[in-house]
Image (cartoon, rainbow, N blue to C red):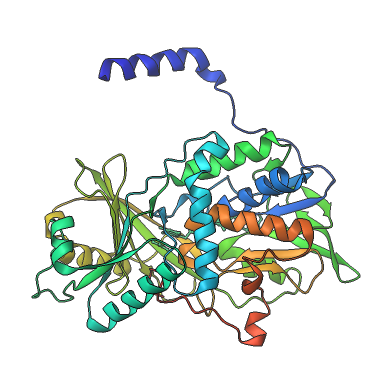
């Protein structure tokens, strides 16, 4: 087996050599497009991909100030699940999970979606009641999930410390078997390749620096590579959304916070599922390379530094070690942060802004990786037809005026 893979590697190296084919072109920007997407993360790429594949709109550019997937898409801990409390949010995340289930086939690109199940732990009677309520709501919505008690958890996860003497004893959990993880880079690369194949121009190192309007509607974007005209512009820039929207005098109820993660040295398989704990601000899975992937809660202050603070990861690791004493001597290799875009109800904002032709898709905060295909699906529909898709209609910007919020802080999975 080992010999085979070494030979296969050598054969491919010789076959492709330095001329390994690029997955997408690198065109110069055109003067004008039917639609411009600002932000080459997973959500922007998915939007462009579905604009082309589902709506036949192919004269599209994705403008990315850095490199494809270099924002939160390439910085997240890749957890995918759809166990949200309220019907509107559950439907949107469940659509995305279903798209994930067919994504490798649809893109002909292995996004390594691994449905290894996701546990959300409860550490108090109050939390267990919330978890039970969420599991019941999920089941009424046809979403898989069940409640697991501490005894069953101890059997399913023998390395988890369920002792009643812990500082935050584990009383039980919800379990979504269809949840899991996917390879974040592959999601971005597969979507980029599919969009490019349909004619979408993916333009990296192209920062949007201004948004021009004419008679109340969007006319185009100023960029570091010149002015580009477009009558439809989608802002899909996660933590930078409010900065971009302000270029068109649109005010978004978004706060940008660093969110951190870190990985350990690789080790033999020891954890075959995903474990999250909102109360202790920590979650963990094991990558296919064997690294433990650990995440923390947000840094509570606003910021744009993609570093994060030491105190936050120290707290997360203390919690991990209490829950998994077996990991107490594991060495952590590297850590980083991404800038997440949090909203007052922990739900996204998707739709047209008061500026005609200017759309936003943001506010996914700490939990938008799982939504990548679903978010692109609904924004593509909204931009193509000028009408929200039924799945994103509840997530319009004006809910912060009408007060029809969809509070998903409990299901968001990461403490805010
Ligand atoms: P991004 O991938 O950030 O893409 C936005 C792009 O816009 C960036 O590439 C940026 O460079 C570009 N941009 C910004 N300004 C401009 C400009 N002026 N001009 C041109 N381009 C611009 N979610 C989950 O579901 N599960 C998880 O396990 C999970 N874990 C996370 C862990 C961490 C540490 C972090 C930081 C986030 C996590 N998330 C998770 C959240 C998730 O990563 C994001 O919600 C999601 O990836 C957002 O995707 P996006 O495409 O909208 O944003
Ligand atoms: O939304 O599931 C989630 C999540 C896990 C880690 C960060 N976000």
- Place residue 386 in its image quadrant: bottom right
Q: Nearer the viewer, residue 315 or 199?
A: 199
User: x%, y% of residue 78?
Assistant: 41, 53
Residue 357, percent from left and from top: 80, 63
**Left or right of 36 in this view: 101:** left
Q: How many marks?
A: 0
Q: Quadrant of the N terminus?
A: top left
Q: Quadrant of the C terminus?
A: bottom left
Residue at 40%, 64% in the rendered image? 308
Q: Nearer the viewer, residue 175 or 359?
A: 175
Tell me the residue at 50%/16% (across/down).
Answer: 17
- Residue 392: in sight, yes or no? yes
- Let me know if residue 305 appears in the view: no
- In this rendering, the answer to whether 290 lies above or below 251 is above
Which x, y percent locates residue 271? Answer: 22, 50
Residue 103 against residue 324 in the figure, above or below: above
Which one is nearer the viewer's eye here, 399 or 34? 399
Name the residue located 66 percent from the left edge and 86 percent from the top edge. Answer: 402
Left or right of 345? Residue 208 is right
Q: Nearer the viewer, residue 114 or 232?
A: 114
- Point 17% across, 64% down: residue: 323
- Give above or below for 199 relative to 284: above
Residue 83 is left or right of residue 24, and the answer is left
Q: Position of residue 228 (x, y in %)?
A: 81, 51
Q: In the rendered image of this protein, does residue 100 appear above or below residue 311?
A: above
């Amino acid at each position: 087996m080992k010999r085979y893979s070494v030979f296969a590697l050598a054969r491919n190296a010789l076959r492709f050599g330095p001329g390994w084919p690029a997955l997408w072109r690198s065109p110069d920007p055109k003067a004008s497009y039917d639609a411009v997407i600002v932000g080459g993360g997973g959500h922007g790429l998915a939007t462009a991909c579905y604009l082309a594949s589902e709506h036949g709109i192919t004269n599209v550019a994705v403008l990315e100030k850095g490199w494809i997937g270099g924002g939160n898409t390439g910085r997240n801990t890749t957890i995918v699940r759809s166990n949200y409390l309220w019907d509107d949010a559950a439907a949107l995340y469940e659509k995305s999970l279903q798209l994930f289930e067919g994504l490798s086939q649809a893109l002909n690109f292995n996004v390594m979606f691994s449905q290894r199940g996701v546990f959300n732990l409860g550490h108090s009677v109050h939390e267990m009641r919330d978890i039970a309520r969420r599991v019941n709501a999920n089941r009424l919505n046809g979403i898989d999930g069940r409640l697991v008690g501490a005894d069953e958890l101890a059997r399913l996860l023998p390395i988890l410390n369920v002792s009643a003497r812990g500082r935050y004893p584990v009383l039980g959990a919800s379990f979504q078997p269809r949840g899991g993880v996917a390879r974040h880079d592959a999601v971005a690369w597969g979507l980029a390749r599919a969009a490019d194949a349909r004619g979408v121009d993916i333009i990296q190192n192209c920062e949007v620096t201004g948004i021009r309007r004419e008679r109340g509607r969007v006319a185009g974007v100023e960029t570091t590579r010149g002015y580009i005209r477009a009558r439809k512009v989608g802002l899909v820039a996660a933590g930078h959304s409010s900065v971009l929207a302000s270029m068109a005098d649109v005010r978004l109820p978004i706060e940008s916070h660093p969110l951190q993660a870190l990985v350990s040295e690789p080790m033999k398989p020891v954890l075959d599922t995903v474990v999250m704990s909102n109360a202790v601000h920590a979650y963990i899975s094991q990558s296919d390379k064997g690294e433990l992937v650990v995440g923390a809660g947000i840094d509570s202050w606003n910021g744009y530094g993609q570093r994060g603070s030491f105190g936050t990861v120290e707290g997360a690791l203390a919690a991990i070690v209490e829950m998994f004493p077996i990991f107490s001597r594991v060495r952590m290799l590297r850590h980083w942060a991404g800038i997440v875009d949090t909203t007052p109800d922990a739900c996204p904002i998707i739709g047209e802004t008061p500026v005609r032709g200017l759309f936003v898709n943001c506010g996914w905060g700490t939990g938008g990786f799982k939504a990548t295909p679903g978010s692109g699906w609904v924004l593509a529909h909204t931009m193509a037809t000028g009408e929200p898709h039924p799945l994103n209609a509840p997530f319009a910007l004006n809910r912060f005026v009408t007060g029809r919020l969809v509070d998903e802080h409990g299901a968001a999975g990461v403490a805010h």
